[in-house]
Image (cartoon, grey):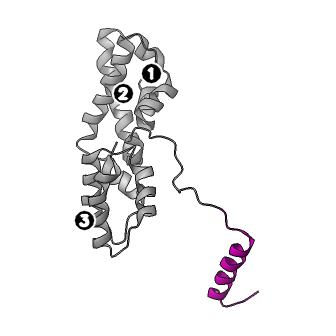
Amino acid sequence: MIELREMATGMAALAVAFNREVDAHVAEVYHTVLGPRLDAAGWQRAVRRALEAESFFPPPAVLLRYGASEGLPQARAVEFYDAIVSCFERGEGLGPREVSERYGTAAMEAFCAAGGNRAFAWCEPRDEPFRRKAFVQGWVETVAVDPALALPPGEAKLALPAVEEPDRHEAARILGGIADRAGRRP
């Protein structure tokens, strides 16, 4: 998890590069989405890749994709595989839902591709390499379709900060401004 203070330098770099003002509300929205799902290295990688590849200020989804893809996908898949096997060796039975909650959607898809709970609860030593290969292949294929699926799930938070509803007069003023911009006044 990345702290808001750690994100400040990257947000400032993005603001300067894309000529966009970043106020406290924008920073809070980005932190709410990205904070629980990226670490400091992932955030730095996301900022660097956005600066290298983007023409406009990137939304959080783009930064998540840039921050998520690191190293060889096979190596990351093996890390998740080993973590899941370790849970089963400790006697913690995991189903697809628990795998998804702990390790993300790609790990859940790979878990199912490798045989699911039945294959992980008991596996003959001679069959373990095949289970591992099926898991890694499933994880890599899933991440190739959408790199964001490689991310472990973050806390379920709203992407937008809470805002007070306008009163009747404020709503009329806002709607009047929109109508003026559209060239017609009600």
- Image position of 178 with respect to 123: above or below: below
Residue range in magenta is 165-186
Residue, x 29% and y 65% (percent of image)? 12
* Secondary structure mostly seen in the magenta stretch: helix
- The Cα–Cα distance between marks 3 and 2, rounded to whole angstroms, is 35 Å
- Mark 1 — residue? 115
Q: Judge the density around disc 1: few (<14), some (14-19), many (≥20) Cα neighbours within 10 Å.
A: some
Q: Which image quadrant is residue 140 in? A: top left
- Closer to the N terminus: mark 2 or mark 1? 1
Judging from the image, what secondary structure is the residue with disc 3 in?
helix
x, y (%) of residue 79? 28, 29
- Residue 67, numbered circle: none
Q: Is residue 129 visible?
A: yes
x, y (%) of residue 55? 33, 72
The residue nearer to you, when weighing 52 against 109, is: 52
State left or right for residue 122 relative to residue 70. Answer: right
- Mark 2 — residue? 134
Is label 3 or label 2 in front?
3
Residue, x 41% and y 16% (percent of image)? 120
**Pointers 2 and 1 in contact (C-beta within 8 Å):** yes
- Image position of 103 with respect to 174: above or below: above
- The C terminus appears in which quarter of the rendering? bottom right
Residue, x 40% and y 60% (percent of image)? 27
